[in-house]
Image (tube, rainbow, N blue to C red):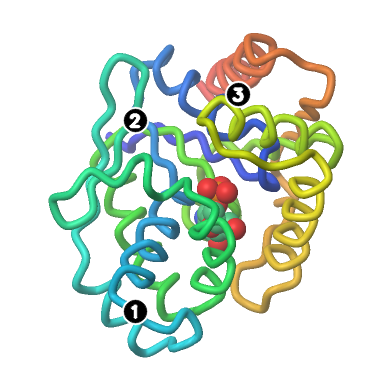
């Protein structure tokens, strides 16, 4: 039987990860964080001293990478080549470089193939930038959005909680820089798929976002039955 897939795209810090993770937990689906895969490749490239503009070398590095996810008790951990890199991929240096790595078509092709395979084997909630448009075009699709200021505030608080010093202004600049790179790049830019349901999370709590996505998904399942 075809697997059930919910695909959630949206800009940085729109609430995708938290929402997708909680929706997956409530439905008992696998949570697939595609951004974490681009981050893991970026981290590996930085550690090995591979130039983030060298597409061929990055393609090779990606093909030779084994990425695994482990979902347990509502948390999700990511392993690169047998090493848990869950925390490391969130460091500012990865933040600064990941948009360059994810620009390369050859890197994307390898990662998209891995993602599609996971979708053939599991009911899942995928989140990223191109999960509604490229990776899972037949999924139930959601586009999460929120105002830039609210997104900067969320990212600032998230980093503060981890003890990473930054400022609201810095986060606002960093997020708008990434929005621009993610939306204007040639390969799979961040786009709102025409079939995606838009959920603006600026004034929603996490619980409300999760309830809304599940409600919309169940309505869709009922309508298709
Ligand atoms: O969602 P995130 O901030 O963890 O994503 C990290 C970067 O990876 C982001 O700058 C865009 C890129 N990305 C992508 O190009 N395609 C995806 N499906 C997911 C993320």
Asked whether residue 130 is in view, the answer is no
Q: Quadrant of residue 56?
A: bottom left
The quarter in which the N terminus is drawn is: top left
Q: Quadrant of residue 186?
A: bottom right
User: Nearer the N terminus, badge 2 or badge 1?
Assistant: 1
Disc 3 to disc 1, C-alpha distance = 46 Å
Q: Which residue is mark 2?
A: 76
- Residue at 19 percent of width and 59 percent of height: 66
Q: Quadrant of ligand 1?
A: bottom right
* Residue 220: mark: 3
Q: Which residue is mark 1?
A: 49
On screen, residue 53 versus residue 37, left or right, reads right
Disc 2 to disc 1, C-alpha distance = 27 Å
- Residue at 23 percent of width and 43 percent of height: 84
Residue 101 spot, x, y in % from top left: 49, 72
In-front residue for pair 119/51 = 51
């Amino acid at each position: 039987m075809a697997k059930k897939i919910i695909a959630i795209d949206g800009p940085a810090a729109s609430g995708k990860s938290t929402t997708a993770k909680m929706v997956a937990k409530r439905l008992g689906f696998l949570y697939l964080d595609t951004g974490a895969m681009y981050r893991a490749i970026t981290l590996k490239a930085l550690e090995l001293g591979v130039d983030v503009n060298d597409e061929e070398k990055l393609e090779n590095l990606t093909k030779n990478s084994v990425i695994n996810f482990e979902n347990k008790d509502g948390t999700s951990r990511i392993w690169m080549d047998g090493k848990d890199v869950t925390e490391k991929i969130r460091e500012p240096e990865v933040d600064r470089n990941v948009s360059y790595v994810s620009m390369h078509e050859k890197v994307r092709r390898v990662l998209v193939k891995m993602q599609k395979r996971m979708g053939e084997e599991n009911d899942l909630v995928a989140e990223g930038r191109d999960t509604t448009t490229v990776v899972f075009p037949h999924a139930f699709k959601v586009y999460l959005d929120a105002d830039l200021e609210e997104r900067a505030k969320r990212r600032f608080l998230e980093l503060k909680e981890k003890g990473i010093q930054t400022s609201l202004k810095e986060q606002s600049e960093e997020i708008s820089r990434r929005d621009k790179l993610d939306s204007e790049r040639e390969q799979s830019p961040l786009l709102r798929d025409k079939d995606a349901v838009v959920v603006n999370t600026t004034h929603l709590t996490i619980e409300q976002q999760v309830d809304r996505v599940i409600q919309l998904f169940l309505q869709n399942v009922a309508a298709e039955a």
